[in-house]
Protein backbone atom coordinates (compact mmCIF):
# COMPACT_ATOMS: atom_id res chain seq x y z
CA UNK A 1 0.00 0.00 0.00
CA UNK A 2 1.43 3.35 -1.05
CA UNK A 3 0.70 5.89 1.69
CA UNK A 4 0.44 9.53 0.66
CA UNK A 5 -0.13 12.51 2.91
CA UNK A 6 -1.62 15.63 1.28
CA UNK A 7 0.02 18.41 3.24
CA UNK A 8 0.78 22.13 3.16
CA UNK A 9 1.20 24.81 5.81
CA UNK A 10 -1.20 27.10 3.98
CA UNK A 11 -4.95 26.70 3.87
CA UNK A 12 -6.97 27.26 0.72
CA UNK A 13 -4.59 25.41 -1.60
CA UNK A 14 -6.95 22.52 -2.34
CA UNK A 15 -5.80 19.73 -0.01
CA UNK A 16 -9.30 18.31 0.44
CA UNK A 17 -10.10 18.82 -3.25
CA UNK A 18 -6.91 16.97 -4.10
CA UNK A 19 -7.69 14.10 -1.72
CA UNK A 20 -11.20 13.61 -3.07
CA UNK A 21 -10.27 13.83 -6.74
CA UNK A 22 -7.17 11.67 -6.48
CA UNK A 23 -9.12 9.01 -4.60
CA UNK A 24 -11.72 8.86 -7.36
CA UNK A 25 -9.06 8.96 -10.09
CA UNK A 26 -7.14 6.09 -8.51
CA UNK A 27 -10.39 4.14 -8.32
CA UNK A 28 -10.86 4.71 -12.06
CA UNK A 29 -7.39 3.25 -12.52
CA UNK A 30 -8.62 0.10 -10.75
CA UNK A 31 -6.87 0.76 -7.48
CA UNK A 32 -8.33 -0.03 -4.08
CA UNK A 33 -8.20 3.22 -2.09
CA UNK A 34 -8.32 4.08 1.61
CA UNK A 35 -8.99 7.72 2.50
CA UNK A 36 -7.88 8.85 5.97
CA UNK A 37 -9.48 12.11 7.14
CA UNK A 38 -6.93 13.35 9.68
CA UNK A 39 -8.04 16.98 9.59
CA UNK A 40 -10.15 17.91 12.67
CA UNK A 41 -12.39 19.93 10.36
CA UNK A 42 -13.35 16.58 8.77
CA UNK A 43 -14.21 18.22 5.44
CA UNK A 44 -13.24 15.17 3.38
CA UNK A 45 -15.62 12.74 5.07
CA UNK A 46 -18.95 14.09 3.68
CA UNK A 47 -17.73 13.51 0.12
CA UNK A 48 -17.84 9.80 0.81
CA UNK A 49 -20.33 9.28 3.64
CA UNK A 50 -23.76 10.86 4.09
CA UNK A 51 -24.30 9.80 7.71
CA UNK A 52 -22.29 10.18 10.92
CA UNK A 53 -20.42 7.02 11.87
CA UNK A 54 -20.05 5.38 15.25
CA UNK A 55 -16.26 5.11 14.94
CA UNK A 56 -13.70 7.53 13.50
CA UNK A 57 -10.00 8.25 13.26
CA UNK A 58 -10.11 9.44 16.86
CA UNK A 59 -10.71 5.86 17.98
CA UNK A 60 -7.62 4.78 16.05
CA UNK A 61 -5.52 7.35 17.89
CA UNK A 62 -6.90 5.98 21.15
CA UNK A 63 -6.02 2.39 20.23
CA UNK A 64 -4.37 1.46 16.92
CA UNK A 65 -5.74 -2.10 17.09
CA UNK A 66 -9.22 -0.60 16.58
CA UNK A 67 -8.40 0.28 12.99
CA UNK A 68 -10.53 -2.37 11.25
CA UNK A 69 -13.63 -1.19 13.14
CA UNK A 70 -12.94 2.41 12.10
CA UNK A 71 -12.97 1.90 8.34
CA UNK A 72 -16.21 2.24 6.38
CA UNK A 73 -17.28 1.45 2.86
CA UNK A 74 -18.28 4.51 0.85
CA UNK A 75 -20.73 5.08 -1.99
CA UNK A 76 -17.87 4.34 -4.39
CA UNK A 77 -17.05 0.68 -4.99
CA UNK A 78 -13.30 0.66 -4.36
CA UNK A 79 -12.94 3.56 -1.93
CA UNK A 80 -13.11 3.06 1.84
CA UNK A 81 -12.67 5.78 4.45
CA UNK A 82 -11.42 6.26 7.97
CA UNK A 83 -13.81 9.13 8.86
CA UNK A 84 -12.71 12.37 10.44
CA UNK A 85 -13.93 13.65 13.79
CA UNK A 86 -14.40 17.30 14.73
CA UNK A 87 -13.59 16.39 18.34
CA UNK A 88 -10.11 15.19 17.33
CA UNK A 89 -7.41 17.06 19.25
CA UNK A 90 -3.64 17.13 19.44
CA UNK A 91 -3.88 15.60 22.93
CA UNK A 92 -5.41 12.46 21.40
CA UNK A 93 -2.00 11.54 19.96
CA UNK A 94 -0.16 9.27 22.38
CA UNK A 95 2.72 8.12 20.13
CA UNK A 96 4.20 9.35 16.85
CA UNK A 97 3.91 5.92 15.26
CA UNK A 98 0.35 5.10 16.30
CA UNK A 99 -1.21 5.77 12.89
CA UNK A 100 1.63 3.97 11.12
CA UNK A 101 1.04 0.91 13.28
CA UNK A 102 -2.68 1.02 12.52
CA UNK A 103 -2.16 1.30 8.77
CA UNK A 104 0.34 -1.56 8.83
CA UNK A 105 -2.45 -3.81 10.11
CA UNK A 106 -4.59 -3.27 7.00
CA UNK A 107 -1.89 -2.53 4.42
CA UNK A 108 -2.62 -5.67 2.39
CA UNK A 109 -6.21 -4.56 1.74
CA UNK A 110 -5.45 -1.44 -0.32
CA UNK A 111 -3.22 -0.19 -3.11
CA UNK A 112 -3.30 3.49 -2.12
CA UNK A 113 -3.88 5.37 1.14
CA UNK A 114 -4.54 9.13 0.96
CA UNK A 115 -4.31 11.15 4.17
CA UNK A 116 -5.89 14.61 4.33
CA UNK A 117 -4.42 16.86 7.03
CA UNK A 118 -4.81 20.27 8.61
CA UNK A 119 -2.67 23.22 7.39
CA UNK A 120 -0.19 22.92 10.26
CA UNK A 121 2.77 20.74 11.18
CA UNK A 122 1.66 19.61 14.62
CA UNK A 123 1.27 16.23 16.30
CA UNK A 124 -1.62 15.02 14.13
CA UNK A 125 0.19 15.88 10.91
CA UNK A 126 3.39 14.36 12.26
CA UNK A 127 1.71 10.98 12.73
CA UNK A 128 0.62 11.06 9.08
CA UNK A 129 4.08 12.02 7.85
CA UNK A 130 5.58 9.25 9.98
CA UNK A 131 3.18 6.75 8.39
CA UNK A 132 3.64 7.98 4.82
CA UNK A 133 5.81 6.99 1.88
CA UNK A 134 5.17 10.30 0.14
CA UNK A 135 4.34 13.88 1.07
CA UNK A 136 2.30 15.51 -1.70
CA UNK A 137 2.10 19.30 -1.49
CA UNK A 138 -0.37 21.28 -3.63
CA UNK A 139 0.65 24.91 -4.10
CA UNK A 140 -0.90 28.02 -5.58
CA UNK A 141 1.56 29.99 -7.68
CA UNK A 142 1.70 33.26 -5.77
CA UNK A 143 4.32 35.38 -4.03
CA UNK A 144 4.12 33.32 -0.82
CA UNK A 145 4.71 30.00 -2.56
CA UNK A 146 8.51 29.88 -2.33
CA UNK A 147 8.69 30.72 1.39
CA UNK A 148 5.95 28.20 2.11
CA UNK A 149 7.76 25.39 0.31
CA UNK A 150 10.95 26.23 2.17
CA UNK A 151 9.17 25.77 5.51
CA UNK A 152 7.53 22.51 4.39
CA UNK A 153 10.94 21.16 3.40
CA UNK A 154 12.40 22.25 6.74
CA UNK A 155 9.59 20.63 8.75
CA UNK A 156 9.91 17.30 6.94
CA UNK A 157 13.60 17.34 7.80
CA UNK A 158 12.87 18.25 11.44
CA UNK A 159 10.63 15.20 11.75
CA UNK A 160 13.58 13.03 10.75
CA UNK A 161 11.92 12.07 7.47
CA UNK A 162 14.65 13.06 5.03
CA UNK A 163 14.24 9.77 3.16
CA UNK A 164 10.53 10.27 2.50
CA UNK A 165 9.56 11.08 -1.06
CA UNK A 166 8.36 14.67 -1.42
CA UNK A 167 6.44 15.84 -4.46
CA UNK A 168 4.90 19.22 -5.23
CA UNK A 169 2.34 20.17 -7.86
CA UNK A 170 0.83 23.48 -8.93
CA UNK A 171 -2.92 23.88 -8.60
CA UNK A 172 -5.50 26.50 -9.61
CA UNK A 173 -3.29 27.34 -12.58
CA UNK A 174 -4.43 29.80 -15.26
CA UNK A 175 -2.43 29.37 -18.45
CA UNK A 176 -2.82 33.02 -19.44
CA UNK A 177 -1.31 34.37 -16.20
CA UNK A 178 2.23 35.53 -16.94
CA UNK A 179 3.01 36.06 -13.25
CA UNK A 180 2.09 32.46 -12.39
CA UNK A 181 4.27 31.17 -15.21
CA UNK A 182 7.22 33.24 -13.99
CA UNK A 183 6.86 31.96 -10.41
CA UNK A 184 6.64 28.37 -11.67
CA UNK A 185 9.80 28.72 -13.76
CA UNK A 186 11.61 30.32 -10.82
CA UNK A 187 10.66 27.53 -8.40
CA UNK A 188 11.85 24.82 -10.76
CA UNK A 189 14.85 26.52 -12.35
CA UNK A 190 16.40 28.38 -9.41
CA UNK A 191 15.22 26.46 -6.36
CA UNK A 192 14.89 22.91 -7.68
CA UNK A 193 11.75 22.02 -5.74
CA UNK A 194 10.44 18.55 -6.67
CA UNK A 195 7.55 19.59 -8.91
CA UNK A 196 5.58 16.94 -10.75
CA UNK A 197 4.93 17.60 -14.43
CA UNK A 198 1.16 17.72 -13.97
CA UNK A 199 -0.49 21.04 -13.12
CA UNK A 200 -4.15 21.29 -12.11
CA UNK A 201 -6.08 24.01 -13.89
CA UNK A 202 -8.29 26.63 -12.30
CA UNK A 203 -12.02 26.29 -12.95
CA UNK A 204 -15.23 27.57 -11.37
CA UNK A 205 -16.62 24.06 -11.89
CA UNK A 206 -14.46 22.90 -8.97
CA UNK A 207 -16.42 25.12 -6.57
CA UNK A 208 -19.69 23.71 -7.93
CA UNK A 209 -18.41 20.16 -7.43
CA UNK A 210 -17.41 20.96 -3.84
CA UNK A 211 -20.89 22.27 -3.06
CA UNK A 212 -22.39 19.01 -4.34
CA UNK A 213 -19.76 16.82 -2.64
CA UNK A 214 -18.68 15.31 -5.94
CA UNK A 215 -15.29 14.58 -7.52
CA UNK A 216 -14.79 16.37 -10.82
CA UNK A 217 -14.99 13.16 -12.84
CA UNK A 218 -18.54 12.69 -11.51
CA UNK A 219 -19.52 16.33 -11.83
CA UNK A 220 -17.96 17.43 -15.14
CA UNK A 221 -15.97 14.56 -16.62
CA UNK A 222 -14.91 16.50 -19.71
CA UNK A 223 -13.66 19.51 -17.75
CA UNK A 224 -9.89 20.09 -17.91
CA UNK A 225 -9.58 19.73 -14.14
CA UNK A 226 -11.02 16.20 -14.23
CA UNK A 227 -8.39 15.24 -16.78
CA UNK A 228 -5.66 16.98 -14.77
CA UNK A 229 -6.38 14.87 -11.69
CA UNK A 230 -6.32 11.69 -13.77
CA UNK A 231 -2.94 12.72 -15.17
CA UNK A 232 -1.74 13.50 -11.64
CA UNK A 233 -2.83 10.05 -10.46
CA UNK A 234 -0.96 8.41 -13.36
CA UNK A 235 2.18 10.38 -12.56
CA UNK A 236 2.06 9.51 -8.85
CA UNK A 237 1.65 5.81 -9.61
CA UNK A 238 4.75 5.95 -11.77
CA UNK A 239 6.78 7.85 -9.17
CA UNK A 240 9.31 5.97 -7.10
CA UNK A 241 8.62 5.45 -3.40
CA UNK A 242 11.14 6.54 -0.78
CA UNK A 243 11.89 4.77 2.45
CA UNK A 244 9.70 6.88 4.72
CA UNK A 245 10.76 7.94 8.21
CA UNK A 246 12.15 4.52 8.95
CA UNK A 247 13.71 4.30 5.48
Image (spheres, rainbow, N blue to C red):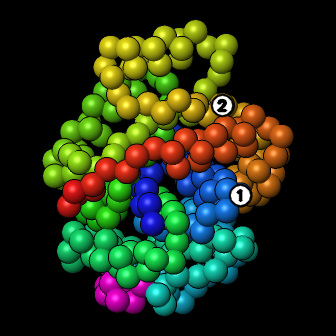
Quadrant in which the N terminus is drawn: bottom left
Q: Is residue 61 above or below residue 150?
A: below
Give the image quarter of residue 54: bottom right
Question: Residue 63 magenta-drawn?
Answer: yes
How would you rate the neighbour count of disc 1 (Cα within 10 Å): few for under 14, some for 14-19, many for 20 or more?
A: some
Q: Closer to the camera: disc 1 or disc 2? A: 1
Instruction: Answer whether residue 192 is visible to the viewer in this image.
Output: yes
> Which residue carries the number 1 mark?
28
Q: Which residues are magenta?
A: 59-67
Label at residue 201: 2
Give the image quarter of residue 72: bottom right
Quadrant in which the C terminus is drawn: bottom left
Q: Secondary structure at mark 2?
A: loop
Q: Which residue appears at 52% of the width and 66% of the height?
A: 111
Question: Residue 191 magenta-drawn?
Answer: no
Residue 25 x %, y %: 66, 53
Is the C-beta separation of discs 1 and 2 under 8 Å? no
Q: Main secondary structure of the magenta part?
A: helix
Q: Is residue 38 above or below residue 134?
A: below
Q: Which residue appears at 51% of the width and 63% of the height?
A: 112
Amino acid sequence: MKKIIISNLKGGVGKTTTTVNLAYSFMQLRKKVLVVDADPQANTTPFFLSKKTEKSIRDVYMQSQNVKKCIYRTKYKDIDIMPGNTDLMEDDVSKADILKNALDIISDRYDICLMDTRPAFEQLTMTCIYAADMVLTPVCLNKFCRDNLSVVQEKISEFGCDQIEWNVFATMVRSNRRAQRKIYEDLIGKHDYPFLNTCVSASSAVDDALIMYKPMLKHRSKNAVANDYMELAYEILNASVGGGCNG
